[in-house]
Image (cartoon, rainbow, N blue to C red):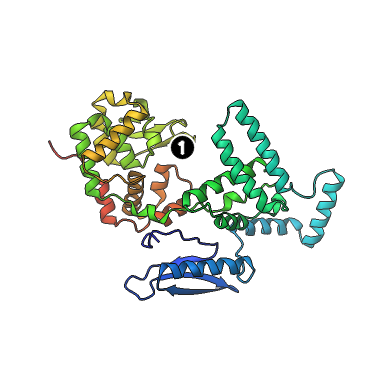
Amino acid sequence: MAEYPKTRITLPRGIRLLPLKKGQPSPFGCSWRVSGKRKAAYFKTIGDLETRLRELKSARAQGEIGRIPTADELMLWRTFIRGCDGVNPLVVLTECKAARSQAGRPTKSLNVEKAVTEYLAVQAKRQEKGTITADSLRQRNRKLISFKEAFASFNLEDITSEKIEDWIDSLEAVAAVSTFNDYRKRLAVFFDYFKSDCPSNPAKKVERRIDLSENEKVMPVEDIKRLLEYARAHQPEVLVRLAAEVFTGLRFTSSAKLEKQHVNFTRKNLKLPKHVMKTRRSHLFEPPEAFWAWAKIGAEHPEGWKMSASQWMHAKSRLFKEAEVDHPSNGLRHSFCSYHVAANESPSKTAYILAHTNEGLLWSTYKGMASKDEGEAFLNLRPDPI
């Protein structure tokens, strides 16, 4: 999918993009299911493809295309059927609701309108206490009030991942993948707050989207080598942090917090405490050998450990500029993922180093972004002999 032009393509559940047919009159394709049978079509332009995707999305909303149950939904249904022990499921459901009513427990989940009103009131109190910022409160208000207006008559248990995905896609304000993911994230936190009313969080079942254009920002191996050699020659004290971003995919926010005790040159591992990690969970892993080859040069310059986050940010930007290397957003992380996956022909080791829980997403995103030879060349980057 990385070969498709830079465009926002909405992929409703059950509808897939097909491999690009370069050099063909109709190179852009998609497939979908009708009555259990998969159908496919190719189109001359990306605009024609997007028109077809919108038609399929509308057809699915009107019930003309059946929805495929998710794995979680199928597992829940099978568990329920087994629990019925041969009794008609409708009888079990009726008796369960009657028992809950007698026990004074609600038989229906909370209404969306009431839930949003309650949640935002709690967030307003948090803002008054200073636990969240005023801007954060405004963002939550804007997104959740819009959600409330769309689903005011629904109960929380009636909201499905498909409803959420279709609703976000329908918003004019959602013009970027990052905006889609932010709406998804806000709703996931909202549903977590009401997990007693809605144990199965539908927002978390909406797949986080990857910007197709992001995948094109893989830095050539020779550019990475030039950047490292320039740092070695002109600012060697930054090499531990730089090598961590290059050879482990560490985010800037984490590399800026690296301290000497986190890097064990004897055991050849990085032990990162939870305050360093975006996941807020500690992480212990063994970087590739290439990391140690460059990091040991940086370790000879202890002043590098004293750099503030701001100093590291400016030093890194200056290195790219002076080394005359393009500096794409998240370029070092994307490049590491692409080359490491290619070299290992598997996402498992890469996912572990990144502390990434979704190997499938990693594989579908970075598979094919680099060749095995390029991946091996990347992992074999070493300082030039002096």
Q: Could you say which quadrant of the image residue 137 lies in?
A: top right
Does residue 200 appear in this view? no
Give SS at disc 1: loop
Q: Where is residue 249 drawn, in percent x and y? A: 36, 42
Q: Residue at x 23, y 26 (%)?
A: 300
Residue most extreme to the right = 102
Q: Is residue 91 above or below residue 240?
A: below
Tell me if residue 286 comes above or below residue 273 in the rendering: below
Quarter occupied by the N terminus? bottom left
Pick whichever, 111 or 335, lies toward us. Answer: 111
| Residue 345, image x, y percentages | 35, 55
Say above or below: 40 vs 101.
Answer: below
Q: Which residue is mark 1?
A: 278
Res 17 seen here: yes
Type of the residue with mark 1: Lys
Front residue of 132/241: it is: 132
Instruction: Single out the residue that lies furthest toward the bottom.
Output: 25
Q: Residue furthest front?
A: 172
Tell me which residue sits at (64%, 33%) in the image. 124
Q: Nearer the viewer, residue 380 or 231?
A: 231
Q: Residues within 10 Å of mark 1 (few under 14, many from 20)?
A: few
